[in-house]
Image: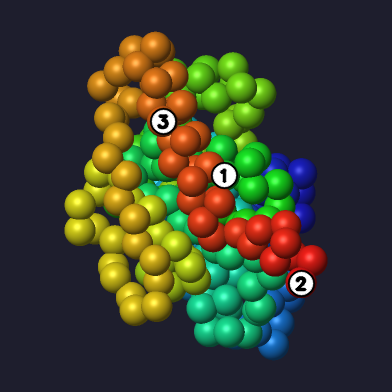
Amino acid sequence: MSTRDGQLALDDPHQVLHRSAEHLAARFDGIVNAETVERVVFESYAALLRTARITVHLPSLAARFANERLTALAQAKGVIPKAVPEVLFVCVQNSGRSQMAAALMRELGAGRVHVRSAGSEPGGDILPAVVSAMAEQGIDLGEEFPKPLTDDVVRAADAVVTMGCGDACPVYPGKRYLDWHLHDPAELDLDGVRRVRDEIRSHVERLLADILPTASEDRA
């Protein structure tokens, strides 16, 4: 293969996706079959492509998204045990409220909870004011991106928190569902986003206190 042909292969998203599917199939060998892995990888890419404004890194983002979905699928089937509670945050575009909630829960939970977020109608990018407001508290959202809501992540969650997305989230028995009424950061200036951020922090602190064992329970 010539250098030019090799470069074309590297630039071809389908080639990158096939390689990602092979890597993920090896990672989930014995847990999820290779055909399902490839389907999830290409479905994830197609879902992100519908709203992405910049597509240069989309295959790698699709691989990350597919990895999360495959992990959730295996957890929902009971093939992969849950070491900690799973919490899913859902808003409309996954570009503001649910991203802030997920980031704050990761920070405050300190490894005691696993967090995912999604959007019923995901946007193209995280809102700049949201990125700025979170950076003020030392939280970098630079690696995050809006993701569509999928059935597998809902099934894997122990608690599902919705924020303004109505009935878009499917309901399954045995899960805890919460609905937080919050202003949409897309309609606010930076000061308004800060107020929503602080309100979300309070909600997250209460949820963590409710779902995590107390120190005395840990010692029991």
Horizontal side of residue 195 vs 213, given as left or right: left
Horizontal side of residue 169 vs 132, given as left or right: left
Which amino acid, mark 3? Glu
Image location (x, y in percent) of residue 6: 72, 49
Q: CA distance from mark 1 to mark 3?
A: 13 Å
Report helix, strand or loop for mark 3.
helix
Measuring 66% from the left and 58% from the top, which residue is drawn there?
214
Res 27 → quadrant: bottom right
Label 1 with label 3: CB-CB less than 8 Å: no
Q: Residues within 10 Å of mark 3 (few under 14, many from 20)?
A: some
**Which residue matches tag 3?**
199
Q: Residues within 10 Å of mark 2 (few under 14, many from 20)?
A: few
Label 3 with label 2: CB-CB less than 8 Å: no
Image location (x, y in percent) of residue 201: 49, 34
Name the image quarter holding the N terminus: bottom right
Measuring 65% from the left and 52% from the top, which residue is drawn there?
9
**Which numbered disc, 1 or 3, marks the residue closer to the eye?**
3
Which amino acid, mark 1? Met
Report helix, strand or loop for mark 2.
loop
**Which numbered disc, 3 or 2, marks the residue closer to the eye?**
2
161 vs 168, nearest the viewer: 161
Which amino acid, mark 2? Ala
Image location (x, y in percent) of residue 124: 39, 35
**Which residue matches tag 1?**
105
Label located before the other in sequence (3 or 2): 3
Measuring 60% from the left and 69% from the top, which residue is drawn there?
71
**Which numbered disc, 1 or 2, marks the residue closer to the eye?**
2
Report helix, strand or loop for mark 1.
helix
Q: CA distance from mark 1 to mark 2?
A: 25 Å
Image location (x, y in percent) of residue 115: 56, 54
Label located before the other in sequence (1 or 3): 1
**Which residue matches tag 2?**
220
